[in-house]
Image (cartoon, rainbow, N blue to C red):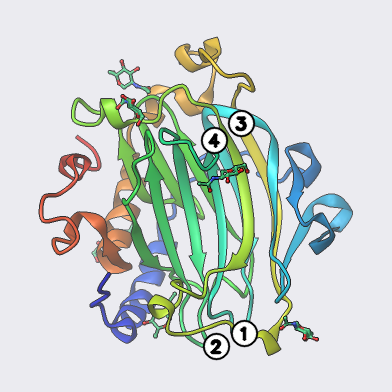
Amino acid sequence: MVWQFRPSMALVAALAVAVVISGTQPQVAAQGKQLRDSFNTYYYCGWQPQYTWLEDNGYTINLKLDNWSGSGFQSSNSYTKGFISTSIKLVPGNSAGVVVAYYMSSPRDNTTTDWDEIDFEFLGNVTGQPWILQTNIFTNGTGGREQRIFLWFDPTADYHTYSILWNEHQILWYVDSMPIRVYRNTTITSATYPTYRPMTIYSSIWNGDSWATRGGLDKIDWTQAPFIASYSGFYVDACTWNKPGPAPSCFYDSSSSWWDQADKWTMTDAEKSAYTNITSNYMIYNYCTDYQRYPVQMPDCAVPPWE
Ligand SMILES: *[C@@H]1O[C@H](CO)[C@@H](O)[C@H](O)[C@H]1NC(C)=O
Ligand SMILES: *[C@@H]1O[C@H](CO)[C@@H](O)[C@H](O)[C@H]1NC(C)=O
Ligand SMILES: *[C@@H]1O[C@H](CO)[C@@H](O)[C@H](O)[C@H]1NC(C)=O
Ligand SMILES: *[C@@H]1O[C@H](CO)[C@@H](O)[C@H](O)[C@H]1NC(C)=O
Ligand SMILES: *[C@@H]1O[C@H](CO)[C@@H](O)[C@H](O)[C@H]1NC(C)=O
Ligand SMILES: CC(=O)N[C@H]1CO[C@H](CO)[C@@H](O)[C@@H]1O
């Protein structure tokens, strides 16, 4: 892939717009709830638990990467539709080649061709250079829908909240309650909209230095190890469904869940403004405008972010 955007200009633009955006921040998507449950409420460490440790009475967890391994956690339950959220403080200093992922995925092994997945992926950088936030969505095994943005803050200086809202009408990726991306269920996308497949939530830190930073040019500097990502404030309010087969009634019944009410079927006006500013000022890559990669756009590219 060819990244033609000039980062220094993006940063200047980012700083200029940050003030404007923070002044009109929409309300937290979860109806003002405190998104701050303990780690064990939803999660356990499924990958190298000895490389993870809790702090703050179980409300904070740290994940470590070194030259031997990365580490990760996953939800005990699987979910269809709902709202998931966590706050993350990324690896400070030289994090080139480090990838931190926070995502939902339906079950998969090396033979699965038809899974669904909704991703946040944070790509580290050398000291002083910006992390990239990449998002993607796989539906029925087809991904390749990457978008990349620079953040309007330093994601290593403090915790920021990353959330996904998923209902029958739209999927929104939020950064600090501002939507940075939307994938809508319309007549164009109804066949490529995640359906009943329950998804498990995962997060991990790993070595992505073959591709993550400047396309793989900047490798991990292992003298800086261990690399540590910290998480705080866990929250999940979603249809729990742990079996294969048809989804539970809450999937079809939109009357009982706040994240499935009419006011969540499309962005609010404040969300639309934030979305417009973010996608016009911080986006550095969009699969929908990569004509080298996709001479013919994927069909979902024709869907407007709202009607
Ligand atoms: C990994 O790092 C440790 C500590 O810096 C070092 O002793 C060891 O040789 C390294 N191992 C490899 C395979 O690079
Ligand atoms: C797929 O995974 C199975 C079980 O882990 C393994 O035995 C098999 O070799 C793998 N196949 C491929 C093509 O990687
Ligand atoms: C999903 O993918 C599977 C396997 O690739 C295929 O058999 C099925 O028809 C696809 N379903 C839809 C709705 O495209
Ligand atoms: C997508 O929208 C259609 C039409 O409103 C609806 O029938 C369908 O259930 C929706 N799909 C999902 C997966 O929610
Ligand atoms: C890292 O910094 C370089 C130089 O500013 C930039 O081109 C790149 O987009 C940044 N992020 C990543 C993950 O490569
Ligand atoms: C939500 C938000 O930040 N909106 C701003 C987006 O940018 C335009 C033009 O710069 C402003 O007028 C909006 O207030």
Circle 3 residue: 237
Percent x, y of residue 134: 42, 60
Which residue type carries mark 3? Asp
Which residue ends up furthest to the left in the rendered image?
295
Q: Going from the N terminus, do you reach mark 1 or mark 3 first?
A: 1
Q: Residue at x 37, y 33 (%)?
A: 140
Circle 4 residue: 83
Label 4: few (<14), some (14–19) or many (≥20) C-alpha neighbours in 10 Å: many
Assign the N terminus to one quadrant of the image.
bottom left
Percent x, y of residue 263: 39, 28
Q: Which mark is residue 93?
A: 1
**What is the C-alpha distance between the residues marked 2 and 4?**
33 Å
Label 1: few (<14), some (14–19) or many (≥20) C-alpha neighbours in 10 Å: some
Q: Which quadrant does ligand 6 occupy?
A: bottom left
Query: Between 13 and 124, which is closer to the camera in this rendering?
Result: 124
Which residue type carries mark 1? Gly
Do the numbered discs 4 and 3 sit on residues whose CB atoms are within 8 Å?
yes
**Label 2 secondary element:** loop
Which residue type carries mark 4? Phe
Within 8 Å: ligand 4 and the Cβ of disc 3? no
